[in-house]
Amino acid sequence: MNYDINELDDQYNSEEKVERGSAYVQDNLWEKVEKAGNKIRFAKDVKALYRYMRDRHIPWYRKSIVVGALIYFISPIDAIPDLAPLIGYLDDLGVVMAVLKFMGSEIIPYYD
């Protein structure tokens, strides 16, 4: 899946749609994290975003940002293919870091 910002806006503009995206993340995230293994040093950030997404007290419109970022991380189609040595996860890192920066201190409680 390759998303542009307009598609993400259309796909995650309601609670029901965010829940469907969350289900996709739950079904596919851990396989991607395991496959990435030691190649990524931001796994703790991905896990914190996942915990945030699963928190029932977070409004759907806040979760939509995280769902979009995690789907981008999971997606096999990236701006920089994950198979590229050394730089394959730079685009994923950029998306994850942008969301973390946007969220600020709101994400801190979701780290182990």
Image (cartoon, grey):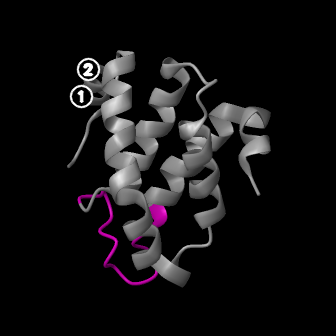
Q: Name, please, the residue furthest toward the left.
A: 1
Q: Nearer the viewer, residue 62 or 91?
A: 62
What secondary structure is the magenta-colored segment mainly? loop
Which dot marks residue 7? 1
What kind of residue is marked 2?
A: Asp
The Cα–Cα distance between marks 1 and 2, rounded to whole angstroms, is 5 Å
Q: Residue at x 64, y 50 (%)?
A: 48
Q: Decide: is 13 above or below 112.
A: above
Residue 41's x, y, as percent? Answer: 62, 72
Which span is picked out in magenta? 77-90
Residue 33's x, y, as percent? Answer: 46, 69
> Taking 91 as reference, is 76 left or right?
left
How many numbered circles does the render carry? 2
Q: Decide: is 95 above or below 76.
A: above
- Mark 1 touching mark 2, by CB under 8 A? yes
> Taking 27 as reference, is 41 left or right?
right
Q: Is residue 86 magenta?
A: yes
Q: Residue at x 38, y 69 (%)?
A: 31
Residue 1's x, y, as percent? Answer: 20, 49
Quadrant in the picture for residue 35 = bottom left
Q: Is residue 73 magenta?
A: no
Which dot marks residue 54? none
